[in-house]
Amino acid sequence: MGIIEKIRADAKAIQVAQADTKAEAIAMANAYLNNVGLPCYAETPAVVLVEIKNVYGALKAYPANEAAELLAQIAGTKTLSNQTLALAERMGMVIQQKQLNQLKELA
């Protein structure tokens, strides 16, 4: 990044910091990110959906949506550990368990 780009980025950061409302700051930041080709800020947290399975007596959390699959890829695992899920929560992600239809067990 050259000096001109750094000055422009710093100026944009100051404008965002001086915005009157959170919505205005997010809109300004997203406009800037869009202009430079970066993904926009998501106001709603990512939902990490997991499916809990019993594997030889051990409970495992398997990814059940794209956010969970990406998290597992980052962790380098096929399942999501308690530690990975705790870190995801600290990052602002929402962890939810997929509800399985257990009517088969009733029959």
Image (cartoon, rainbow, N blue to C red):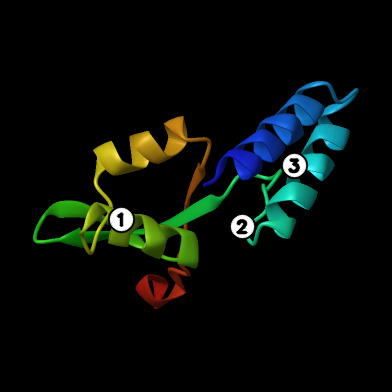
Question: Residue extending furthest left?
Answer: 56
How far apart, in angstroms, are the residues tagged by discs 1 and 2? 19 Å
Disc 3, SS: helix
Q: Amino acid at mark 2?
A: Leu
Residue 38 x/y as whole percent: 61, 57
Q: Amino acid at mark 1?
A: Ile
Of labels 3 and 1, earlier in sequence is 3
Task: Give the quarter of the image for residue 16.
Answer: top right
- Quadrant assignment for the C terminus: bottom left
Residue 104 x/y as whole percent: 40, 77
Disc 1, SS: helix
- Vertical placement of 101 versus 22: above or below? below
Is disc 2 in contact with disc 3, using a CB cutoff of under 8 Å? no
Q: Which mark is residue 74?
A: 1
Q: Amino acid at mark 3?
A: Ala
Q: Which mark is residue 38?
A: 2
Q: Name the residue beneath numbered marker 3.
A: 29
